[in-house]
Image: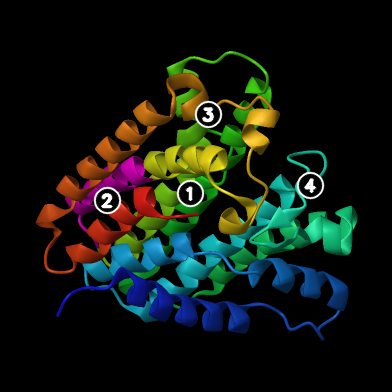
Amino acid sequence: MTFSLKQYFATRSEEINACLDRLLPTVGTPPSLLHEAMRYSLFAGGKRLRPILVLAAGEALEGNREYLLPVGCAFEMLHTYSLIHDDLPAMDNDDLRRGMPTCHRKFGDAVAILAGDALLTRAFQVLAELEVPPVLLERKVQVIVELAQGGGTVEGMIGGQMADIAAEGKAVDAETLAYIHRSKTGALIRAAVVSGGLMAGASEAEIATLRRYAECIGLAFQIADDILDVTSTAEALGKTPGKDVAAGKATYPALFGLEASRVKAQALVDEAVALVEPLGRQKEILVALARFIVERPS
């Protein structure tokens, strides 16, 4: 039977959303406004790419979804916290996220900040409380480290965001741009893929393969995002296009041009596909996800 990435996204997204619903406090749980804001941003849509990467990497190595799903949900919580804070007036000052008013536009800056903080905290609580068999206990600790590093300051998401802010309006070289993209976007994608492998009991060699695969698709994803910011519309993106150019941000199209950026993204995807060829019969999930990175319309 031919593998359908569209069907895979639909099925896994439904499972992820159900798991997120179970893991988050209900709106009726005090403080209700805060929990409403957390749920508003978490369930506002989105591709669920990071939790799906956790699942895809784990399933490629025949891991158990009972453990993979909560790990994926923790990644989605941390990712959503970053989006809430990224949209704030002090950062990107955006009005739209996933086609809806941003969290601070709907609930105010203070509630949005706390909602982001709460999702970040909840992500680590979910991992800490996850019950796993003894053979996976050490792996779970490694996953917590991966998530912390992927979202952190040393070549992690926060460090990349800081470098991105520092580079606004300045001429940057290719090395600085690669650092920004590798850290701001790629680090959490890398951590998600590696974590899926860890929870599936991957060998050191398999983890190394998954790590490099994720580095390739993480950078390709951000290059594709840069391209879409130039070429797409608010309706397609679900957020305001052209903001990178307006803010003078460091992007691949700005430094290399659109065509060279497309070529670079495709080369990274080709490398990622070649890397996972030896992984076995479930590799088609990871192959399809890599190709989706550069082919996605938004």
| Foreground disc of the pair 2, 3 | 3
Badges 4 and 3: C-beta atoms under 8 Å apart? no
Work out whether residue 62 or residue 224 is closer to the camera in this orientation and state it. Answer: 224
In three-dimensional space, the C-alpha distance between marks 2 and 3, rounded to whole angstroms, equals 26 Å
Element on which disc 3 rests: loop
For the residues labelled 4 and 3, the Cα–Cα distance comes to 21 Å
Q: Is residue 203 magenta?
A: yes
At which x and y percent is residue 228? 51, 43
Instruction: Give the residue at mark 1.
Output: 188
Q: Which residue is mark 2?
A: 210
* Mark in the foreground, 1 or 3: 3
Q: Quadrant of residue 268?
A: top left
Q: Residue at x 85, y 78 (%)?
A: 32
Whether residue 278 is situated above or below residue 158 in the rendered picture: below
* Magenta-colored stretch includes residue 177: no
Image x and y of residue 58, in percent: 30, 67
Task: Decide: few, some or many residues near mark 1? Use Cα within 10 Å; few <14, some 14-19, many ≥20.
Answer: many
Side (left or right) of 93 relative to 154: right
Mark 2 vs mark 4, foreground winner is 4
Pick whichever of labels 4 and 3 is earlier in the sequence: 4
The magenta span reads 202-217
Image coordinates for residue 202, horizontal then vertical, percent:
23, 60
Q: CA distance from mark 4 to mark 1?
A: 20 Å
SS under mark 4: loop
- Kindly identify the amino acid type of the residue bearing the numbered disc 1: Leu
Of the residues shown, which amino acid type is indicated by label 4?
Leu
| Dot placed on the residue nearer the N-terminal end, 4 or 1 | 4
Question: Which quarter of the figure has residue 169?
Answer: top right
Give the residue type at disc 2. Leu
For marks 1 and 2, the one nearer the N-term is: 1
The image's mark for residue 251 is 3
